Amino acid sequence: MVFRSSAWARGLSTFSIVSAAGAGLLGCVPAVTHTHTTITFASPEQPDLTSRGAAAVRLRVQDASVSLTRSGVMIDPRGYLLTTFSAVGVGAARARGGRPGTLFGGGDEVRVEVFEGPYSSTPVEHVGRVVRGDLRLNLALVRITGTPDGPLTDDVRFAAVEPPTDATLAWGGFGWAIGASPTIPTLTAFHANTTAGIQNSEGQVAGFLVNVVEPTLDGAGYYDARGALVGVYMNGFVRPTSRIPTAWREALAAGHIEDRVIDGITTLEPGRWAEARPIGDAVFVPGDDETRADVVEEYLFALPATAAGTIEVEPPVSVTAYQRGRVLQSGNGEIYVPAEPDVYVAVRMPRPTDPRGLRLRVRFTAEQ
């Protein structure tokens, strides 16, 4: 699309001519005639996103202490939608509401509002169940199981957009996040520009920063300049669709997903080392120096039972024990954990630049 500022340029040119002529009449300078130059701004044509609106959904989750409105995108016509884990559960160490990995309301009563298109203000309400989650990638897969009136029949199909495995955004490019708002009855489309790209130590694009921060769009589908689904919006960060776990795609291809698998938090066994290999996939959170992807990334561990003991970490990096988002103990390399219920541990590692990554080892030794 081309925007021309010829009117503005003509105004500026006219002002210059009059000023020069006036000065000549006063005997200061001779009259000079200026020619104006048209200023042209060029940008790619906006794609038709209307068909993408039918694949966008509004999510509503309710827990004892949490009531959220978030977004998602339908990626399978049988009723599977992609969103963020933070839209349906506790995804970070500091988050209130329980141990990371805990699903709001148990994960079986996610309200999914399906729109007929971008102008529809009367979405049809469905009930969804979380079937997959990954705290490290902050992604979740929700399956629509029915409506408030009963279960979903096998012949029901939804408008969906298949997420490509090789799509990525361009540094400095632009796109649109299409999602829902708790105060606007219809869908919303936010235009955004990618301001930075984050690559992990294996050469994969972990994600892109965009210049739009909108919490209710958390989990929305993100489309590029051609209108192709390229990522999932995460409040200022976009996770490319190429990072959707291969196991999720394989499970969808094999048939309906009946079980539930949540990855990203490891339960420690007393006296045994648990290992992880950080590669730099953390979500970049603008303005939060503790979780910035270019500084540190967080690994989460659960304790096996309510027991006091010692947490050891190799290398001796930052380790913190939490209880429902509240800090219990913090240190470097080793901390003592009191005998409290629902305690979990967050270890923060420097973001690796070596292609081999870094090695992290964590061990819990119960107090005798």
Image (tube, rainbow, N blue to C red):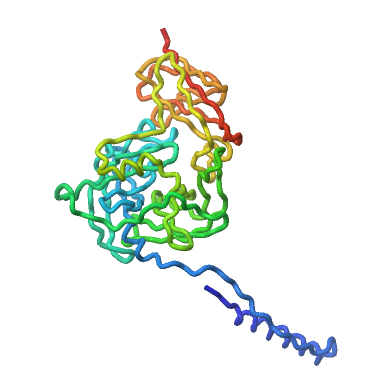
Q: How many marks?
A: 0
Tell me which residue sits at (48%, 23%) in the image. 329
Q: How far across and down, in percent of the image, does residue 125 sit?
A: 23, 53
Front position in the image: 300 or 327: 300
Front position in the image: 278 or 321: 278
Q: How far across and down, in percent of the image, does residue 321 sit?
A: 45, 25
154 lies left or right of 367: left
- Name the residue furthest front: 254
Front position in the image: 123 or 258: 258
61 is higher (above) or lower (below) than 307: below
Q: How far across and down, in percent of the image, does residue 299 sit?
A: 47, 30
Tell me which residue sits at (29%, 48%) in the image. 80
Q: Quadrant of residue 305?
A: top left
186 is higher (above) or lower (below) than 106: below
Q: How far across and down, in percent of the image, does residue 110 sit?
A: 27, 45
Q: Quadrant of residue 190?
A: bottom left
Tell me which residue sits at (50%, 18%) in the image. 312
49 is higher (above) or lower (below) than 93: below
Q: Quadrant of the C terminus?
A: top left
- Name the residue furthest bottom: 25
206 lies left or right of 72: right
- Name the residue furthest left: 149
258 lies left or right of 97: left
Q: Quadrant of residue 33?
A: bottom right
Tell me which residue sits at (32%, 54%) in the image. 57
